[in-house]
Amino acid sequence: MKLRIILAATASLVTLPALAAAAAPVNAAVHDSIRQAFCPQPKSEGTAPTPAPVAPPNAVEPARVFDNLYFVGDRSTSAWALTTSEGIILIDAGFHHNVEGTIIGGMRKLGLKPEDVKYVIVSHGHNDHFGGANLLQKTYKSRIVMSEADWEHMVTWPQRGSPAPFPDRDVVVKDGDVIRLGDQSVRMVVTPGHTPGTLSPIFEVRDGSRRHFVGYWGGDGAGHLDPAGLRTYAAAVDRFINLDPRVDVPLSNHVVADGALLKLPLLAARKAGEPHPFVTGNAEFRAWAGVLKSCAEAFLPAK
Ligand SMILES: [Zn+2]
């Protein structure tokens, strides 16, 4: 939290070298955020329990992050709207209780029409990501995309917390498939681990005349897996980071994983010609995914 305030303050008086210098602590802060959220946490022994932090307001202001990519999420779960010449591809659908306010409301606030959502790519069959899909399918006739394994997983896994209505089974994709809409294509990568058929899409985004590629990791946590599942997760990370050397934007569906809350204020303060805070380069994308992998491996029993 302290670092976030410092970075936000720094961003308001940036020069180009200052912003570049700010990238290293931001990257380190994102790695720390992943470790806190997804690595095994040391158990405290014999000490008084730490008081629970006061929950912050859950809402996050929706934002245009790239020319063709918009953040519509909150502090618990993220969705991303990818605009094309023929409509919108929504990546993840949030909880069923925040789809109307956070996702649909956020899109309208940004000037996007939820009626234009042609596809909803659901990263995996947990209710914090498919939760809004039923409403989008019923209201806007959006096509719902999931892997074969996760269409099955969605209805067989004991969903925790907020129950959500399932979308009707619709588009089934496999590894290597491409979802095309207008001038945009999205490569489907199946990265099993977090769930049996987690989808981690790769797609192009634009920042003015510059082209970048997002590597969107679809399943952030691994603490619920058995050793075989943990190894599967780690292998999926290794494969994912080697698929496309153009990937230079790490994103995910939780702000604790992709650091969106750290980067959005920097983006808002960005001046013309300055680097884009969500563009890290391929080496940092690989390092970032490596932290997710190392958290999974840390749950493996000691030999
Ligand atoms: Zn999940």
Image (cartoon, rainbow, N blue to C red):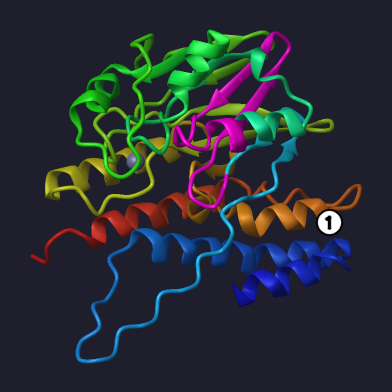
Taking the image as shown, residue 66 lies to the left or right of residue 284, namely: right
Depicted 232 relative to depicted 60: above or below: above
Q: Position of residue 272 (x, y in %)?
A: 91, 47
Reading the image, the residue beneath label 1 is: 269
Residue 175 in sight from this viewpoint? no
* The magenta segment: 74-103
Residue occupying image coordinates x 43% and y 13% = 177
- Dividing the picture into quadrants, the one containing residue 208 is top right
Q: Position of residue 252 (x, y in %)?
A: 50, 42
Give whichever of 8, 281 is nearer the camera.
8
Amino acid type of disc 1?
Ala
263 in the magenta segment: no
Quadrant position of the C terminus in the picture: bottom left
Depicted 51 relative to depicted 195: above or below: below
Q: Position of residue 161 (x, y in %)?
A: 31, 45
Is label 1 in a helix, a strand or a loop? helix
Depicted 222 relative to depicted 200: above or below: below
Give whichever of 213, 155 is nearer the camera.
155
Give whichever of 294, 117 is nearer the camera.
117
